[in-house]
Each structure stands twice: as structure tokens, then as C-alpha cells.
Image (spheres, helix red, strand yellow):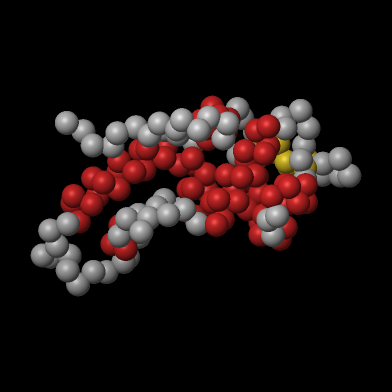
Amino acid sequence: MLSLSKKIDYALIALSYLTRTPQRPVNTKEIAEEYDLPVELLAKILQKLAKAELLVSTSGPTGGYRLSRTPDEISVGSIVDIIEGRPALVQCMRSEDSHCGQIGKCTIRTPLMRVNARMLDLLDHISLAEICRDETDTRVTIPLLVRA
């Protein structure tokens, strides 16, 4: 079953929190305590996001992290890419060097590549702002993935 990892969950939770506190830098410990997350793992995730320039990091006693751009400009797809790389539905789509003994006679690779492309497109077009907006709106709408 396709699912997002705990690391991506934690990244989205932290970024959502930073979206709601744009007026000041927020440190890792504050976010971890707010959501009962492991501080060490969250620190690694936030450092990765800062290295990818999705966050701005400020040192010092009043330092912490802030978003480097508006939540509308940050896609869920970019967050997934930074934390774990591009997702793939099947192993043969994960890397160029993965070998599959069925490649010559496989009948599902091409259709699954289309499904995978649609999934990536969907992730790339959902913004952090939409995720945060959906926190308070229980009427979540999901775009139809099937084209006529």
C-alpha cells in the first residue's frame, strides 16, 4: 500500500506549525513538544529542509526555523523529494540500476508509470497552504485522478 513515511509526516507537521507562526523563528524543541515528536529525528528533518533552502535557520537563543517562502509556493511533492526522494509505486521505477527479471515481458510497467506520473503531479500541485487550510476544514476535496 502506498503511504507517506513518518519522516514526511513529521516534516508536514513541522511545516504546518511554522506556517501558523510566521512572525518568529521556532526551534525544534518547541515543535517536538507541541506534537510529542522525537527531537533528534525532527532536528534532522528540519536540517534537511533548511539545507534544501525550504527553511531559513537562525542561530542563537532566540533562533530557530522559518519558512523561506510562502506556503503557497511550497508543494507537498517538493517536501517528499527533499525528505525521501521521488516516490515510486513499484521497485523498477525507484532507480535506474534496479533490475527486474520480468522487464522483457512485463505488461504493467507502462500503465503503472502513467499512474505514478499522475500521483507525482498531484503531489506537486498540492501546496503547504492547502494542507494547512484543510486542517480546519473537514470538507476536504480530492481532485479526480482519472481522465475521461
Asked whether the viewer can see residue 42, the reply is: yes
**Quarter residue 142 falls in:** top left
Choose between 28 and 92: the one closer to the eye.
Answer: 28
Asked whether the viewer can see residue 73, the reply is: no
x, y percent for residue 127: 50, 32
x, y percent for residue 7: 56, 55
Q: Is residue 29 above or below residue 92?
A: above
Quarter of the image with the N terminus is: bottom left
Quarter of the image with the C terminus is: top left
Residue farthest along the bottom direction in this orientation? 101
Q: Residue at x 76, y 40 (%)?
A: 26
x, y percent for residue 137: 53, 30
Q: Is residue 35 above or below residue 78?
A: below
Q: Residue at x 50, y 33 (%)?
A: 138
Q: Residue at x 23, y 69 (%)?
A: 100
Q: Residue at x 17, y 65 (%)?
A: 103
In the drawing, does residue 143 fall left or right of residue 59?
left
Choose between 86 and 6: the one closer to the eye.
Answer: 6
In the drawing, does residue 129 fall left or right of residue 25?
left
Residue farthest along the right direction in this orientation? 61
Total tally of numbered discs in the picture? 0
Q: Is residue 119 above or below residue 32?
A: above
x, y percent for residue 78: 49, 41
